[in-house]
Amino acid sequence: MIRVGLLGAGRIGRIHGGNVAVSGRARLVAVADALADAARDLATALGADVRSADAIIAAADIDAVLICSPTDTHADLIEAAVRAGKAVFCEKPVDLDAGRIEACLRVVAASGQPLMIGFNRRFDPSFAEARRRILAGEIGPVEMVTILSRDPSPPPPSYVTRSGGLFRDMMIHDFDMARFLLGEEPVEVHAVASCLVDPGIGAAGDVDTAAVLLKTASGKIAQISNSRRASYGYDQRFEVHGATGMVSARNVPVTTVEIATVAGFRTDPAQPFFLERYAAAYRAELDHFLGCVADGTAPSPSGEDGLKAQKLADAATLSHQTGAPVRLKA
């Protein structure tokens, strides 16, 4: 039984903590959070102790830590945990600065401890199956990837000011998914963006509507479309076009019920947001991490995957600011 400590009892921490509690291969030992009430409530619900983050990292009765705390704490907590001999799962990103991520990954490598980054979409059952079929050659060599990712409503401007911007906060998932589906590293990034949804986001220095083109060295192309507004639910789709066919993954509706009348056909909207849409992905993601800890194998996505997605986000930000494509260093 893998003994787990949870750092962060907010929205995503509650998801991961709950999944540990029902996993069957791990036990949640302790929870830490800057808000004492949040830590106490989650620990009580899941039968765990409340401890400080430092105490969890130093504890002899904890094998692995899940880092679900604010972004600006991630790199420091990762370094402390691996130095203490803990396996680490960390929500994206490691940090908003690629240089800081590189320094953190050097500490991880020196420790020999496993680090997994929380790009949960790789574990969505439909997305994972689509990639399996791509790797099986069912559509031939990949030529073009199209990813659509749109939130149901924008976050408050107060969130935007500390998020790192749409490319680093929201689209970073799509950069990882583009790499996952292309099978090659993008070497060129061209981004365009606007503020069309909430003027407050623009006033905070960010955008809420964006499109990015990625190109690999061999010429494969990925198109990413992001919006902070989708009136019909949480829009999460992609299409991969290959030399001999195409594979796509569509939205997941609230139910599969369909009503047919003289007025036409009517179905339910897409799932309302990421907690519902990716519930199965979060479970599969945690199971993969725990399996790697148990078996002593390297988890994926790795810290290097987190770094590469961050560099794409940085390049997209620069491209938007300058209006020109950005070439990535090899």
Image (cartoon, rainbow, N blue to C red):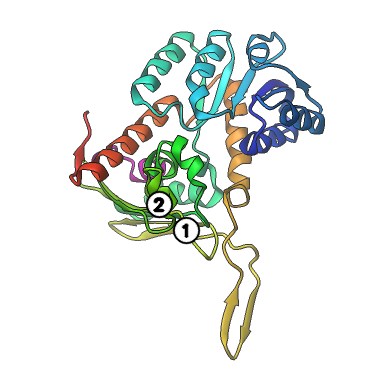
- The quarter of the image holding the N terminus is top right
Position of residue 317 measured from the top left corner of the image (x, y, whole percent):
30, 40
- As drawn, is 86 to the left or to the right of 203? right
Q: Is residue 240 visible?
A: yes
Q: Is residue 215 visible?
A: no
Q: Residue at x 20, y 39 (%)?
A: 326
Position of residue 77 measured from the top left corner of the image (x, y, whole percent):
54, 18
Nearer to us in this view, 39 or 269: 39
Q: Are marks 2 and 1 in contact (CB under 8 Å)?
A: yes
Magenta includes 180? yes
Disc with the residue nearer the chain's start (2 vs 1): 2
What type is the residue that disc 1 sits on?
Answer: Arg
Provide the secondary structure element on which disc 1 rests. loop
Number of marks present in the image shown: 2
Mark sitting on residue 218:
none
Position of residue 24 measured from the top left corner of the image (x, y, whole percent):
74, 32
Q: Is residue 27 above or below residue 228?
A: above
Magenta includes 197? no
Q: Quadrant of residue 296?
A: top right
Q: Is residue 3 above or below residue 137?
A: above
Q: Residue at x 80, y 34 (%)?
A: 45
Q: Dot 2, how many residues are within 10 Å of its Cα: few (below 14), some (14-19), or many (20+)?
A: many
- Find disc 2 in the rendering and name its residue: 208
What type is the residue that disc 2 sits on?
Answer: Asp
- Find disc 1 in the rendering and name its residue: 229
Q: Is residue 83 above or below residue 315?
A: above
**Range shown magenta:** 176-188
Position of residue 107 measured from the top left corner of the image (x, y, whole percent):
44, 12
